[in-house]
Amino acid sequence: SFHLQSMCNDLFDIKQQNIDLSKGILLVSSPFSEDGLFQKSVVLLVEHDENGSLGFILNKQTDFKVEEVVSEIESFEAPVLMGGPVSPTNLFFIHRKSTIPKSYHIIGNTYWMGDFEALITQINAHLISPDSIRFFFGYSGWTKGQLEAEVKNNFWLLASSRKYDIWNDNNLWETILKDMGIDENLLKTIPDNPSLN
């Protein structure tokens, strides 16, 4: 299927943004990817170095709200997303709050993880709004060289996270691909699971 993706990417003249693999960028699944969880997905890369890579899928909703998952959180209408296939029973988060201690800076005003107790305290004190944090079950991880190989094989297209509203755009995958020159009507014809056809 890698060969097919490469052919399709050429065929539809996808305008790649000139970006290198680095933390803070977005991995956008190829329109012709058939990989269940990663299909039509956008991943924020929060770590990338010589040992491997780690990121979170930004556009796969679950039916859970964080207050159902973390009993100490009183009322907070924030959904929990499916961040990836690794450690799916663990909760992770990215946020826009530099006031949370032990956070890791990703890019711009975006951070990941940090002191969980401090986070809960700030949420319950209404110092954090639901649109400035995202919770995830699990994460997406790649071993040394694995992500580079997937990008080379056209499994992922790379995009700048500074250019898109990763916090509020509910059609992030479509938005980015339209920017890359893919016809909106064509995107609508791609089924959610091409291998079922």
Image: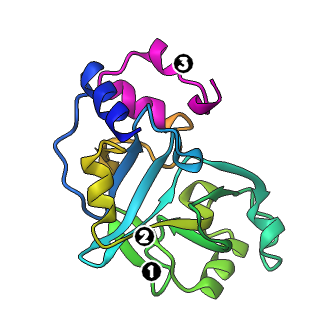
The reply to whether callout 2 and callout 3 are in contact (CB within 8 Å) is no
Q: Quadrant of the N terminus?
A: top left
Residue range highlighted in magenta: 173-197
SS assignment at label 3: helix
Q: Is residue 125 above or below residue 171?
A: below
Q: Residue type at mark 2: give it.
A: Tyr
Q: Residue type at mark 1: give it.
A: Ser
What residue is rendered at 58% in x and 49% in y?
37
**Other-residue count near label 2 (Cα within 10 Å), few / some / many at <14 / 14–19 / ≥20:** many
CA–CA distance in space, label 2 to label 3: 33 Å
Q: Is residue 170 above or below residue 88?
A: above
SS assignment at label 1: loop
Q: Quadrant of the C terminus?
A: top right
Tell me the residue that label 1 is attached to: 103
Q: Is residue 169 above or below residue 189?
A: below
- Queried whether the magenta region covers residue 76, the answer comes back as no
Picture quarter containing residue 106?
bottom left
- Which sits earlier in the primary sequence, circle 1 or circle 2? 1
The reply to whether callout 1 and callout 2 are in contact (CB within 8 Å) is yes
In percent of width and height, residue 146 lies at: 33, 64
